Amino acid sequence: MVKDRLKAKNIVITGASGGIGAEIAKLCAARGANLVLLARSIDKLEQLQSDLQQKHHVNVDVFQLDVSDTNQVEAVYQRIFDTIGDIDILVNNAGFGVFHEAHEASIDEIKGMFEVNVVGLMACTSMVLPKMRARRFGHIINIASQAGKIATPKSSVYSATKHAVLGYTNSLRMELADFNVQVTSVNPGPIATNFFSIADEQGTYVKNVQRYMLQPEFVARKIVDSMLTKTREINLPRWMNMGSVVYVLFPRLFERIGKRMLNSK
């Protein structure tokens, strides 16, 4: 049974205190998975932990973690291994963006986005790789973005981080192909979460794309349905992903025609 695939599996989710991370946790718990939830906001994690344990009677452990602190990543993951043993599925969901033109982006913003979106993701993945390879079992799911396929104005740094995530994910998939470890990239368009409270402080981008925004529950369900399958990519919405195909084939034309639309941030 598809819904029994996750029963008693150990799933770690970063950035689990809200948005699609929290929605993924809810759906996994409903399918009988044991969870480890990671985020900077321990209060939100503890509330989610209580709700999920009461409703679904599964094991839920929570740890406070800033993935940009690689020393903390190593310490927390060692605690996870000591607590639950093996990790079956890792969902690298933690990330943030700030929509500024390149000349407006501060060095602190640039470093912050790369430390969380790229280095933090790689650090968490590095902690699970040896055991997954040895067991010849596991699934790594990296939340990237359509911005990783189509660079857009006012998101030069954010797009760069997601390009890096996609490059890393695609390479990782090939490295693990002979070890029965699945690797999936998730490339959503804009999602109706608090991501934009930081990325788009003026609310301009949200106002312009509100009718196209994905609901976090929908995205989470697609991700959970893919767990422990050989799904290579999840691209949402599908029509937006067609733009990345056109972009690869006709980049000059795409940039000329799409500039005004893509500059709506």
Image: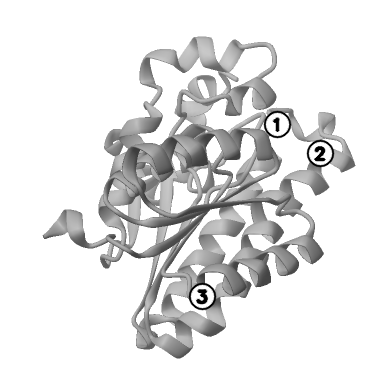
Residue at the image point whose x is 51% and y is 41% from the top:
49
Q: Is residue 192 above or below residue 123?
A: above
Of the pair 216 and 112, the residue shown nearer to us: 216
Q: Front-most of 215 and 107?
A: 215
Question: Residue beneath label 3, please?
Answer: 85
Are there few (<14), some (14-19), or many (20+) residues within 10 Å of tag 3?
few
Q: CA distance from mark 1 to mark 3?
A: 36 Å
Residue at mark 2 to residue at mark 1: CA–CA distance: 8 Å
Do the residues bearing badges 2 and 1 touch, measured as CB atoms within 8 Å? yes
- Label 1 sits on a secondary structure element that is loop
The residue that appears at 63% across and 30% down in the rendered structure is: 153
Image-quadrant location for residue 220: top left
Asked whether, in this view, residue 105 is left or right of residue 163, the answer is: right
For residue 236, say whether it is visible.
Answer: no
The answer to whether residue 256 is left or right of residue 106 is: left
Chain-order first, disc 1 or disc 3: 3
Q: Return the x and y of residue 109 as percentages of the image width and height.
A: 81, 38
Query: Is residue 39 depicted above or below 182 in this figure?
Result: above
Q: Secondary structure at mark 2?
A: helix
In the image, farthest residue toward the right: 107
Amino acid at the residue labelled 2: Glu
- Residue 98 numbered tag: 1
Work out whether residue 167 or residue 46 is closer to the camera in this orientation and state it: 46
* Residue located at (66% from left, 68% from top): 79
Picture quarter with the N terminus: bottom left
Mark 3 belongs to which amino acid?
Answer: Gly
